[in-house]
Amino acid sequence: MPYIINEQEENRAIVRKYRELLTVVYPKTDKDERKAIRKAFVLATNAHNGVRRKSGEPYIYHPIAVAMICCKEMNLGATSVICALLHDVVEDTDYTLENMRDMFGDLVAEIIDGLTKIEDLVFDNNMSIQAENFKKIFLSMSKDVRVILIKLADRLHNMRTLDSMPPEKQLKIASETSYFYVPFAHRLGLYTIKSELEDYAMKYTNPTEYYAIAERLKGTEEERTHLIEEFVKPIKENLEANGIHAEISSRTKSIYSIHQKIIRKNVNFEDIYDIFAVRFVFDSPIEEEFEICWKIYKIVCLLYQTNPSRDRNFLTHPKANGYQSLHLTAMSKAGKWVEVQIRSKRMDEIAEKGLAAHYKYKEDGTDDSDVDARLEDWLLKTREILMSKDSDALDFLNEVRLNLGLKEVYVFTPKGDMKTLPAGSTVLDLAYALHTNLGDHCIGAKVNYNIVPLNKVLENGDQVEIITSKRQSPKAEWVEFVRTSKAKRSIRDFLRSELRNAAQADNPELAAKSQENKQQQEEIERFKRKVTGEISNRTIDDLIDEQLKATPSAFMLDGDYEKIKYVIATCCNPIPGDQVVGFQVADNKIVVHQTSCPHAIEQMSKFGNRIIKTKWRKGQDVAFLSGIRLTGFDRKGMIKEIIDVVTSQLDLNIRSLNIETKNNVFTGTLMLYIQSVRALTNLIESLRAIDSMEKVERIGYDA
């Protein structure tokens, strides 16, 4: 329904929204702060006067909403509210940073500068505008973390109102959100915001699966409500009998999380046992928190059978973002597994509001030194990346994303000192974490007294002794062995230094070695392209030229390849009926992906200017390669029945069929040419009807 302009009603709405903001702000601010907030509101309202969003609404609705998110959902204070109200003023109006500095001081001006997009640089097709702007945000964030928090609030409101944008903009913004903003929300502990951003991003990049899961959740809502009520009733009675007062709430797993679990665990919707969870939150002095958590844990265990393998003790081992809680999974009387989360009010606020809540408790005098150290360590690593030699914006962003992981491993040196590394780290990562020189000369290690190569992945509890040699030096392939940004950066710095030295000294031997390293790097890039079936970002940058200007802004996919040169990406193999998007590459060629493909999401998040609106032409008679995965109990004649369904019943062309059987259970991969998603769905349903067939599903990405 189109937006109808009514200026009188809009003015009343602006005042009403501002008063709602003041209601939330008032308890957290003094008189002078509220005066400054009013001044910022008046300035923003005047600056954006007459400007409207794509929805037709007055633009000022947006900064007010961002300020409300900062204050209400992130628990931030007056400075953040002022900056949220003004965050688009310098970028979109005639006001300057100096105006902000004169009216609101240096701190507000610096934060707004960090939030203002780069406009005065000349960008070419080899640059990622998004990456350059993100690098600017991180430069500011390293000085004041409120920059990224306000930016997250800004993005959250944009995602909540994304329906009014054109489809190609929706894809660009949703991809940026899942690729950049979600990891930062996660790392900063903003669980609620992170989940909401994930769901909104999936709604636009993978709408079919999003709405399918949403309908399943809606259809089972009444059943879940009844199950939770019956589950918590005896627990509540026992808590009261033991003098424990706890607020009890339930939450449903986010649509995105459910979808990820379906893919990761290769299960159906019905098989996910932690779709819903019950949370027990109590208020107590910090010194009594652990004791009460374990008391509630004991009560649940006495009432229900639990799954010990699903217990998670985040009390004594908090997550990297400060998250603390005690988790267990219990079997309800209805035969459904229920996840139970137990934590204090302080833990709950940090879990939901992350970094901002942590600093609130720090200011109140609560000892959160461990959490503080973890967060400061992460910010320190980000600052180190910013100081990296020869790092362009894309390299910088890739390194920052590597530094965002929350899963960690704890390993020990021969002397018993504990070191923390991201999950998936190798011996070489540890060597570089200890010292750059140790990494440069690493040839392997002794892990738990056994000799292992330098690419050995470390596990929790490993004791590691690094082995070095003076003759060893970094190789180009080492970049593929390491997980941490410091290790990758150190290896690249060494290789670049060698190349420069070779050029300066004109040393044939050194130049030959540098050329060998360069060739190795190129070989790695070629291998990566072969795996993904698509040209890498760096190669695309090198190939783009003026010919791309002749490429249309939208096109229809059909069998006439000569009209517009396009290729179907082998990483996701889209077929008619899938939501698709095109990307410009060299020679007027377009690579077509599913919009939900991780490679497409990365491309859209970095190179929004290359997105081409793409649709399938209706009624075309063209077959595309696709694949399905089969699982079942083996029996005589099973393969014949599969082939009969595909070729005889549905008249489809098989490209390959691979079946393996172990202990009477078979798994198989079927690749075939098919005309549409509907035809593929019919095939899957027909194969599922075969006796002893347990699971049939479309192959996902990079299969």
Image (cartoon, rainbow, N blue to C red):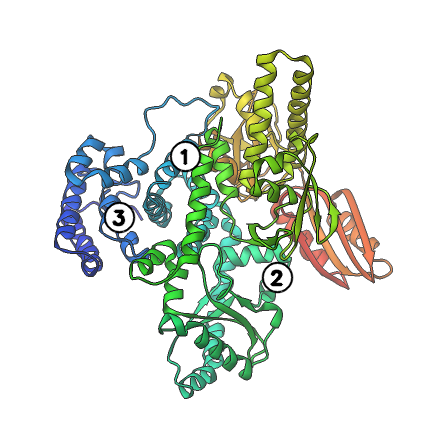
Image coordinates of residue 580 in percent, x first then y, are: 53, 39
Q: Nearer the viewer, mark 2 or mark 1?
A: 1
Relative to 604, residue 350 above or below: below
User: Is there a contact, CB below 8 Å, between mark 3 and mark 1?
Assistant: no
Give the residue at mark 3: 80
Amino acid type of the residue that numbered disc 3 sits on in the rendered structure: Ser
Q: Residues within 10 Å of mark 2 (few under 14, many from 20)?
A: few
Amino acid type of the residue that numbered disc 2 sits on in the rendered structure: Asn
The one nearer the camera, 505 or 124, is 505
Relative to 274, residue 201 above or below: above
Give the residue at mark 2: 268
Amino acid type of the residue that numbered disc 1 sits on in the rendered structure: Lys
The tag earlier along the polypeptide, 3 or 1, is: 3
Residue at image point 47% right, 65% down: 252
The one nearer the camera, 38 or 407, is 407
Q: How far apart are the two marked residues, 2 and 3, measured between alpha carbons?
A: 43 Å
Residue at image point 73% right, 46% down: 452
Residue 117 relative to residue 499: left or right? left
Q: Residues within 10 Å of mark 1 (few under 14, many from 20)?
A: many
